[in-house]
Amino acid sequence: MCMLVLFTVFAIFAFATCGGYSGQLRVSVDCMEKARSNLSIGIDFAYPFRLHQVSFDAPVCEGIREERVFLIGDYSSSAEFFVTIAVFAFLYSLMATIVYIFFQNKYRENSRGPLIDFIVTVVFSFMWLVSSSAWGKALSDVKIATDPDEVQLLISACKVQTNKCGSVLEPRWSGLNTSVVFGFLNFVLWAGNIWFVFKETGWHKGASSLAGGGSEKQSGTFNNQGILDQSAGYNTQGNLSQPTEYSQVGGPTSYSNQM
Ligand SMILES: *[C@@H]1O[C@H](CO)[C@@H](O)[C@H](O)[C@H]1NC(C)=O
């Protein structure tokens, strides 16, 4: 049960920190003709990081004219992919929790449960790895594209030696860094769970082992195992000769057994 909560909470953290992000940077354009200067030009951007749609007005330092400047890059595909995976992982964990609480017995009767759970877990592990990597790469590109020193290069007035441009404020990155960390934590969590879910399918023992289904013994075996105990669990539960292990059926119950 607490494993299920962990899966759910970690998924929430991943999409909330990324999808809820908004940041701001500030640059200054100090024209030789002081009256034209703007020493605090704020530039706001947010998820999903379509930076090529983010614009701001900067003085041209000639007359009262201003120019509209656009940031560069579109990182929405990686960001949206990451958030989508996180949201679906959250929904699956939530569904598994509900099944575990309300439909546990029904789920055990259905032999397709462990199979589906196994496939879904493998797919989500892979997706977490791919989307976290893609998002991590996109984030490093976003950091460069929104670096005030880089943004100054886009302003034509800053190309004139007599004008001075400066960086006033850099965006905060802690939230987005956290989202990448949580992405990889989720990958570790899901990938680590593959073995436990695989055991529920009973494949590693051959078809004959399915006869042992329904035993309640193993729920005691796995009870009170936290996530930290899982590494130990790999050794002790890797014992293939123990006939009661595979009898657990269903994804949600497989989580519960690892508590
Ligand atoms: C400087 O730019 C900001 C937009 O970032 C604008 O709101 C403000 O009015 C500008 N200030 C001057 C003096 O033009």
Image: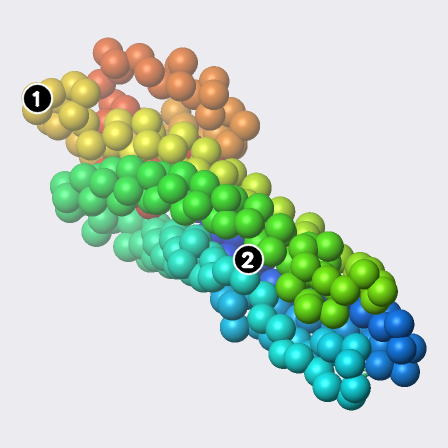
Q: Residue at x 84, y 81 (%)?
A: 36
Q: Quadrant of residue 95?
A: bottom left
Residue marked by disc 1: 208
Q: Amino acid at mark 1?
A: Ser
Residue 18: image tag:
2
> Is 115 situated left or right of 17 in this image?
left
Q: Is the CB of mark 1 within 8 Å of ligand 1?
A: no
Q: Residue at x 28, y 55 (%)?
A: 103
Residue 208 in sight = yes
Few, some or many residues within 10 Å of mark 1 (<14, 14–19, 20+): few
Q: Quadrant of residue 169?
A: bottom right
Residue 120: image tag:
none
Image coordinates for residue 168, horizontal then vertical, percent:
83, 62
Q: Is residue 165 above or below residue 256?
A: below
> Is 193 situated left or right of 161 in this image?
left
Which is more foreground, mark 2 or mark 1? Answer: 2
Q: Quadrant of residue 98?
A: bottom left
Q: CA distance from mark 2 to mark 1?
A: 47 Å
Q: Is the CB of mark 2 within 8 Å of ligand 1?
A: no
> Is 21 situated left or right of 171 in this image?
left
- Dot 2: element: helix
Residue 39 in sight = no
Task: Indicate the quadrant containing the N terminus: top left, top right, bottom left or bottom right.
Answer: top left
